[in-house]
Image (cartoon, rainbow, N blue to C red):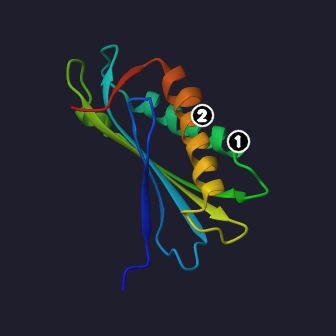
């Protein structure tokens, strides 16, 4: 029996956004997945410090921005996945960022207020963290 539910969100940014829950009957957690194809704007021998900085900025952004009325902003899981070993200029690499949010009240993923809140959060995260980073060019397709 399938309990999970996932929705795709539209954005004008070069990212694919999916929101969902693994249990739609008792949705204790919600997740947001942002994915894009990334191309570095400059050549470097080691991109790992830059990726660590992006991960840190994502966590700081979420702890400052997440509504404490809706979510437990002390329990946020961030899985930022971009392999530093495969990054090179003139080549796009796949990037994925999955964020797990723990709800205070059990609201279903298809609730319009949940969709609007996660849409706003995703777009603000893209604008405030990924686009202001300046080290990478983001693309919707490879």
Find the distance from the CA under tag 1 to the CA under tag 2: 9 Å
Quick check: 1 left or right of 127?
A: left
Q: Residue furthest top?
A: 42
Which residue is located at x 45 percent, y 35 percent? 11
Q: Residue furthest right?
A: 69
Residue 65's mark? 1
Which residue is located at x 20 percent, y 18 percent? 90
Q: Residue furthest bottom?
A: 1
Which residue is located at x 30 percent, y 21 percent? 45
State the image quarter where residue 136 is shown: top left
Q: Earlier in the sequence, mark 1 or mark 2?
A: 1
Work out whether residue 121 or residue 64 is closer to the camera in this orientation and state it.
121
Residue linked to disc 2:
124
Disc 1 is placed on an element classified as: helix
Q: Residue furthest front?
A: 112
Q: Position of residue 106 (x, y in %)?
A: 66, 72
Quick check: 25 left or right of 70?
A: left
Q: Position of residue 128 (x, y in %)?
A: 59, 28
Callout 1: 10 Å neighbours few (<14), some, many (20+)?
few
Q: Position of residue 101 (x, y in %)?
A: 60, 59
Disc 2 is placed on an element classified as: helix
Q: Position of residue 104 (x, y in %)?
A: 73, 67
Q: Are marks 1 and 2 in contact (CB under 8 Å)?
A: yes
State the image quarter where residue 14 is shown: top left
Work out whether residue 126 or residue 76 is closer to the camera in this orientation and state it.
126
Q: Is residue 101 above or below residue 135?
A: below
For marks 1 and 2, give the one nearer the viewer: 2
Work out whether residue 52 or residue 107 is closer to the camera in this orientation and state it.
107
């Amino acid at each position: 029996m399938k309990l999970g539910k996932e929705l795709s969100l539209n954005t004008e940014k070069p990212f694919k956004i999916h929101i969902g829950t693994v249990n739609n009957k008792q949705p204790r957690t919600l997740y947001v997945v942002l994915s894009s194809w990334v191309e570095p704007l400059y050549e470097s021998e080691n991109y790992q410090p830059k990726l660590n900085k992006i991960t840190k900025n994502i966590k700081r952004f979420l702890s400052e921005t997440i509504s404490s009325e809706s979510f437990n902003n002390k329990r946020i899981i961030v899985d930022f996945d971009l392999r530093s070993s495969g990054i090179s200029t003139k080549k796009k690499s796949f990037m994925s960022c999955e964020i797990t949010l723990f709800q205070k009240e059990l609201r279903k993923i298809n609730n319009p207020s949940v969709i609007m809140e996660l849409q706003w959060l995703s777009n603000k995260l893209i604008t405030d963290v990924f686009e202001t980073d300046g080290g990478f060019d983001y693309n919707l397709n490879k």
